[in-house]
């Protein structure tokens, strides 16, 4: 059974800086969900470690060293792996949230039907109580004028009391049903807000991943440009130190 935790997903900061999996996700209901969270945390840590050391690794290499491109591509692959793991994690969170929202909406619909039935019962109880109370009042008034009605009054008294108590219970049930509906309406609103927050987080994560891809592609292009500017092909050809040969048309003395 999916639990009805009405917690909004707080911003986890993925769109700004590398970070582990979010610290306040929806409650995990099974081992598979926990595995996804752990995988997202592991891939994020791996990428963060490689990314923080990339510039230091590249700075010690010449622009045309093939290890420059390899180092950048390694970090780029780690970034893609992080995004894949996070996307799977947030998909799982979104699926659970959708299930909870659907369950809350179903309960709200059932609550509407139940409240309608309770209101009908309360209306019937009020009518019965009013009718019996009126009959009891009339009988008591008549017993004061006509002999032999006292036993009927004694018999009808407990019935009138029972009807009043039944009407009071029906009114209390109606109040409880209304409170339950109010709570469920709030839960549905919270579920919808949570769904919107999850989708916003997923969109931000996708946009961030696209920016990182563009960055690594630009970083590789920059390394290639530096290689073209500073590599052996860009250096001027060395001048020969040997003496020039005399032309064929001149004779030596």
Image: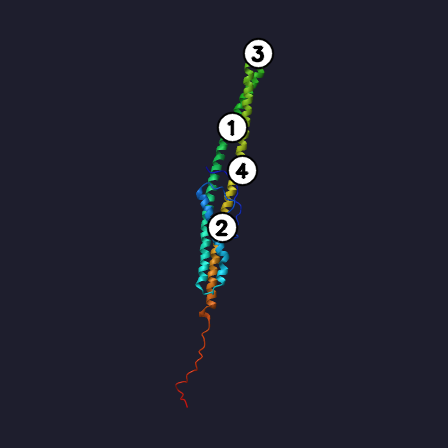
Q: Are there few (<14), some (14-19), or many (20+) residues within 10 Å of tag 2?
A: many
Q: Which of 62/225 is in front? A: 62
Of callouts 1 and 4, the N-terminal one: 1
Of callouts 3 and 4, the N-terminal one: 3
- Can you say whether 100 is above or below 13 in the image? above
Q: Are there few (<14), some (14-19), or many (20+) residues within 10 Å of tag 1?
A: many
Of callouts 2 and 4, the N-terminal one: 4
Image quarter (top left, top right, bottom left or bottom right) of the N terminus: top left
Residue 98 in the image: state x and y as whole percent. Answer: 47, 41
For the question of whether residue 211 can be seen, the reply is: no
Q: Which of 17/121 is in front? A: 17
For the question of whether residue 78 can be seen, the reply is: yes
Q: CA distance from mark 1 to mark 4?
A: 21 Å
Identify the mark at residue 186; answer none if there is no mark: 4
**Residue beneath disc 3:** 150
Image quarter (top left, top right, bottom left or bottom right) of the C terminus: bottom left
Of callouts 1 and 3, the N-terminal one: 1
Q: CA distance from mark 1 to mark 2?
A: 47 Å
Identify the mark at residue 205; answer none if there is no mark: 2
| Of the two numbered discs 3 and 2 in the rendering, the one whose residue sits closer to the viewer | 2
Q: Residue furthest bottom?
A: 253
Disc 2 vs disc 4: Cβ atoms closer than 8 Å? no
Residue 4 in the image: state x and y as whole percent. Answer: 50, 38
Q: Residue furthest left?
A: 248
| Of the two numbered discs 1 and 2 in the rendering, the one whose residue sits closer to the viewer | 2
Of callouts 3 and 2, the N-terminal one: 3
- Can you say whether 168 is above or below 245 in the image? above
Residue at (46%, 70%) from the top-left corner? 234
């Amino acid at each position: 059974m999916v639990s009805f935790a009405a917690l909004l997903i707080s911003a986890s900061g993925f769109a700004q800086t590398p970070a582990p999996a979010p610290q306040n996700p929806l409650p995990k209901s099974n081992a598979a969900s926990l595995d996804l969270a752990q995988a997202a945390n592991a891939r994020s840590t791996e990428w963060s470690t490689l990314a923080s050391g990339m510039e230091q690794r590249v700075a010690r290499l010449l622009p045309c060293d093939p290890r420059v491109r390899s180092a950048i591509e390694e970090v780029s692959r780690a970034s893609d792996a992080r995004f894949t793991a996070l996307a799977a994690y947030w998909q799982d969170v979104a699926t659970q949230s959708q299930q909870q929202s659907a369950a809350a909406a179903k309960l709200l619909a059932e609550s509407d039907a139940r409240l309608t039935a309770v209101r009908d019962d309360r209306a019937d109880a009020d009518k019965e109580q009013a009718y019996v109370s009126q009959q009891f009042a009339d009988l008591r008034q008549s017993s004061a004028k006509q002999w032999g009605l006292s036993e009927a009054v004694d018999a009808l008294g407990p019935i009138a009391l029972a009807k009043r108590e039944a009407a009071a219970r029906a009114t209390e049930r109606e109040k409880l049903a209304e409170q339950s509906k109010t709570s469920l309406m709030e839960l549905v609103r919270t579920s919808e807000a949570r769904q919107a927050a999850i989708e916003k987080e997923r969109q931000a994560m996708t946009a961030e991943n696209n920016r990182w891809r563009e960055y690594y592609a630009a970083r590789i292009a920059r390394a290639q440009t530096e290689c073209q500017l500073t590599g052996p092909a860009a250096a001027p050809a060395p001048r020969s130190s040997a003496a020039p040969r005399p032309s064929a048309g001149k004779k030596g003395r």
